[in-house]
Amino acid sequence: MKKIIVVLTLFVSFAASAVNQAFFDGVIIANTNQAIGSATNITNSITKSDQQAAKANFANLVRDWKKVETTYLLGDLNEDYLDTPRYVDIFHGNNEDIKSQLDLIIESDDDLTYALYKHSHKTINALEYVLFTKDITNPRVKAIALIISKSIASYLTEILDGYHTHQAKFLKSEQFASAVLLNTLVAGTYKLKEWRIGDVVGLSKKYKGKADNRRAEYVLSGNSINAIKAILQTHQQVINSKNYKDFGDIAREYKANAEIDTAISHLNKSISNAKDMVDSDLDSAKGVALFNATSQLMTSYYIALMDRLGFVSKVLDADGD
Amino acid sequence: MKAQKRFAISSVLTIAMAATTAQAFWGNNEANPILSTYADIATANYSDALNDAKTMQATIKGFTDNPTADTMSTAKASWLMARESYGLTEAFRLSNGPIDAEEGWHAQAYGAPEGQLNAWPLDENMIDYTTDAKGNTTSGNIIDTAGMFNPGGENPTVVNVSTITADAIAALNENGGDANVATGYHAIEFLLWGQDQDYANFMKDSVTNGALVAGQRTVADYTTAKNADRRKQYLNAASALIVSDLEAMVAAWADGDNTNYKAALLGNNSDSTKNIDEKTALSQIFAGLGVFVKSELANERIAVAVLTPSEEDEHSCFSDNTHRDITTNYQGFKNLIFGTYNGVSYGTAPVDAMQDKSELMALIKSADNKVNQMNALAQTSRHFDHQIRPNDSQAKQIKKLKNELRAIGDQMIYVSRANGIDLTVGDVTDGEETKL
């Protein structure tokens, strides 16, 4: 697996007037609420055994969860929430073969409360497998799908409650808020270009020259580009929104105009490249172009922008097992 | 099959061991007091670990000579005792020392035996029978193959196990892959306790049911059962290897030998090319301590088990001694940063130079409480494998312990800085730790 560690050290001289309540409510809280709504919708579809609706709602859940994940900083506000995302999503974070495990669970007659004891069995990845390869009119499959969708909704609600409870830490310290936000953007951009695009198109360090569409994040449902678009849209919410003071505005206050303009340019290019793509395009020239644009976006964040704003950054990545 | 949890030393700190001509002669210079304290604790700790291993070897011999419930119980007790002192030594890992150095003269001289001593998690199915996920008894293992054994995996080498010797199991260890563990404490643990895990579903716990029940191998496996004599051979071979490996560690850290690793660490090796630059030594030790507590203990030994959750990923999954593994590993770390061993000060400690220890001490106090709680419950209420169940209130506490231990690992940056060594978060984190 690939491992990334982003380390940020903030120079004492940096004292930005950080993102404010409008940003917090308009991005962090609003995106989480939207994801909860999508999880609820998918639960309703499953309850009605409406597989087509459930599949359509799954696309919305992917979109909205990726937005929550892209700016997930609750673990920085309270360490009790450090691990919450891995209860929702195990992409690149788990070596388990959940497909065969879920098959065994479906075939067995074990009480599902115990059979689905692993957190990975109740993730969005497990839900994709069940919805797109199984028949939810089967009572046991339906019961499993419901347990998963309700678990996701529960964790999203936990995240929302956590943000409300611990938002003061984000809002009261401008330096802290800026640091964790930029940290989240940088780490997320690495995963975007390396895992979600590079591994598929054969441009990541791990899979150089070995393109394979089966490595796409949502290969079963064809929602991989949907996820990538959602991630890029969230970056736009963070650095280039007209609705509230965002991170781009702060960068300009600290005379990082050229650097933030460059970042926005690479972000817009990435969004433009992804706009008309479908999952099967990842293993093509379109995928290469998207990889290059997101690589430039990451570089603009973690080298130019960080440096200009007075952060010291260090990004490590290594091939693991 | 699980990948063995063993790390390379942080690439950021892959600093060549440098000779210092000024320290070429025995006793010409005063050794750095922190290094002296560290080295003296190593001398004492490895000596204790060896003595306990020898006791374990003797009781295992006694058990295999006369297998009864009593002698089996004595052998188990000696294994548990041996784990206490060995667990403390694990804090010496990941610091380019003799236990696991990947290169250098000392890697050759002492054999870097960590993987042979304490590899885990192991594929116990390779050693002896188990009950698989479908309730069937497995076969095709080292015990029941009286001839040439193929361990399987990637590019395996066939080994003659007509007689199970130390050489044979050493040749099989990690032969074909990291999970093919044939030697060390955990191989003995499996041969004494047997399977505890229900591979089908650890929540059902149908193999050895009960929150305070570990593996239940019977004495019959060593008396009337098929291959009883081969199990005896295996136990004696494995314990002999542990003793010989720890003898090498004791030699590496022995006093009064100006050719060994301890002399080199303190700049007193008679071969000046072997002496380690003081700053390099301190960097490797501080970073190693950080990586050990943060990536190995907190991440591999706690986080993987509790966040999956997975009984297979608890450290001593046959004996349910994981709470003691965590406790001794943590205590070993504390020994080295506070310069103490068995409650006795061994001299200048890394934390002595810190102007402000408040954050570190607060983290340690909180982690101490959680470790104590985990131990108390493991002895009276439920073992670690039940404490990590998702519906158990302890799971949340163990996750908090994991977070605190990772924060303590990061504190090594400040411990290090107080002693004139600059480290980063990357230096105290293994880049290849399991991503969760």
Image (cartoon, coloured by chain):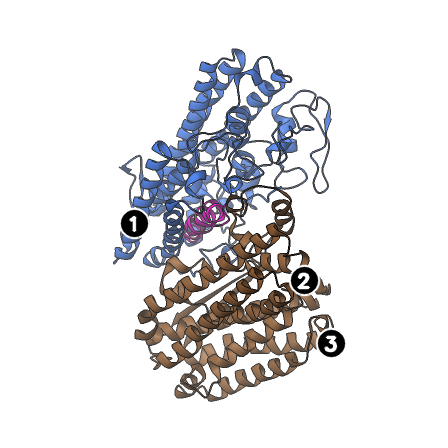
Left or right? Give the position of B13 relative to B199: left
- The amino acid pointed to by label 1 is Ser
Q: Position of residue B230 (x, y in %)?
A: 63, 19
B204 part of magenta stretch: no
The magenta segment: B281-309
Q: CA distance from mark 1 to mark 2?
A: 45 Å
| Letter of the blue chain | B
In the image, what residue occupies the spot 52% across and 71% down?
A64
Q: Position of residue A92 (x, y in %)?
A: 58, 59
Left or right? Give the position of A310 relative to A52: left
In the image, what residue occupies the spot 40% across and 32% down?
B85
Contact (CB < 8 A) between labels 3 and 1?
no
Q: Secondary structure at mark 3?
A: helix
Chain letter of the residue beneath label 1 in the structure image: B
In the image, what residue occupies the spot 44% across and 14% down?
B70
- Residue A285, numbered circle: 3
Q: Tell me, what hue is chain A? A: brown
- The amino acid pointed to by label 2 is Leu
Which residue is denoted by mark 2 in the rendering? A220
Contact (CB < 8 A) between labels 1 and 2?
no
- The amino acid pointed to by label 3 is Ala
Marks 3 and 2, the one that precedes in the sequence: 2
Q: Main secondary structure of the magenta part?
A: helix
Circle 2 Cα neighbour tier, 10 Å, few/some/many (<14 / 14–19 / ≥20): some
Q: Secondary structure at mark 1?
A: helix
Q: Position of residue A52 (x, y in %)?
A: 65, 66
- Residue B366, numbered circle: 1
Circle 1 Cα neighbour tier, 10 Å, few/some/many (<14 / 14–19 / ≥20): some
Same chain for the residues at labels 3 and 1, yes or no?
no
B307 part of magenta stretch: yes
Towards the viewer: B244 or B381: B381
